[in-house]
Amino acid sequence: MVQTESGRLSTTGFTKEEDFGKLISYTGTNFYPAEGRVTTLWFAMAESGKNFNQYVFDKSMDAYILGLGAKLLFKGTVPRELRDELKKTDKDAEYRYMVSGVGSDDPVRFYAFKQKEKKLMIQVSSNSAASYVKFVELKEFKQTIQKYSAEGMKKDIDATGKAIVNINFDTDKSTLKADGQDVVNQIVALLKGAPALKLSIEGHTDNTGSAERNKALSAERSNAVMLALVSTGIDKGNLKSAGFGADKPLVANDSEENKAKNRRVELVKF
């Protein structure tokens, strides 16, 4: 039977579904992070006390997935040194983005599958008690956050003393993405429209990864925004920057939606 995360019989056929998430697969040589619709299945025996037949499940699942035309990327145990390296950037990566067997000696299998316009990555792990299957249908991220205008920033600063903006950077870098530069352009318009306005540019992250790296990265990114503003002629004396990492969350870091809210830049009047 398919169980929910609480161990009860699933009524939907799935343990967990996410419209957009991440799944990290192992290709046999390196990790491959895939993004899209993620589905989790947890199989266990319906009768309590009855052993789960791991061998039969593995044979059946392998034959079924390969019968669909999938390619087996890797079968076995992911090398510990590679798992340790992955944890350096995200200590919870195995738990959040991979099947449970990755962090143990349970057999793990990774597949890639393409059918018509759909591309999927599939992960399977099992032991004598249960089996876990995760798959992701690859798709592009759709931005749901509306562009923040200079007028909107000014309104928020006048009302609360600060404006909260979402500025996109390259992964684990302080390099602005194109839409991040668009937001910076709006900050330029704000400051040129109010030459006396002084702003502290303060970077914040969620709690993914180490606290030390988060604080350093948020400082690098806020400083990059400040330098981008100065390069347009904004008076550096009216600006300062700081990075707080995950020390000042807006909400609890208990879901992907809340983590997205905590990844932000605040423009604080001083």
Image (cartoon, helix red, strand yellow):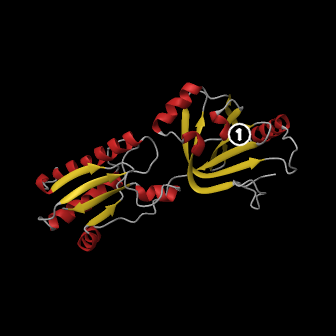
| Residue at the (45%, 61%) spot, across then down | 251
Where is 19 relative to 212, above or below? below
| Residue at the (82%, 51%) spot, across then down | 1
Residue 173, by quadrant, is top left
| Residue at the (86%, 40%) spot, across then down | 51
Kind of residue at disc 1: Val
| 100 displayed left or right of 34 | right
- Image quarter where the C terminus lies is bottom left
Say which of 190 and 247 sits in front.
247
Mark 1 burial class by Cα count in 10 Å: few <14, some 14-19, many 20+: many
| 6 displayed left or right of 79 | right
Q: Position of residue 62 (x, y in %)?
A: 77, 37
- The residue where tag 1 is placed is 124
| 175 displayed left or right of 34 | left
Residue 70, by quadrant, is top right
Residue 120, by quadrant, is top right
Q: Position of residue 189 (x, y in %)?
A: 20, 64
* Residue 164 shows up from this direction: yes
* Residue 172 shows up from this direction: no
Q: Position of residue 148 (x, y in %)?
A: 33, 65
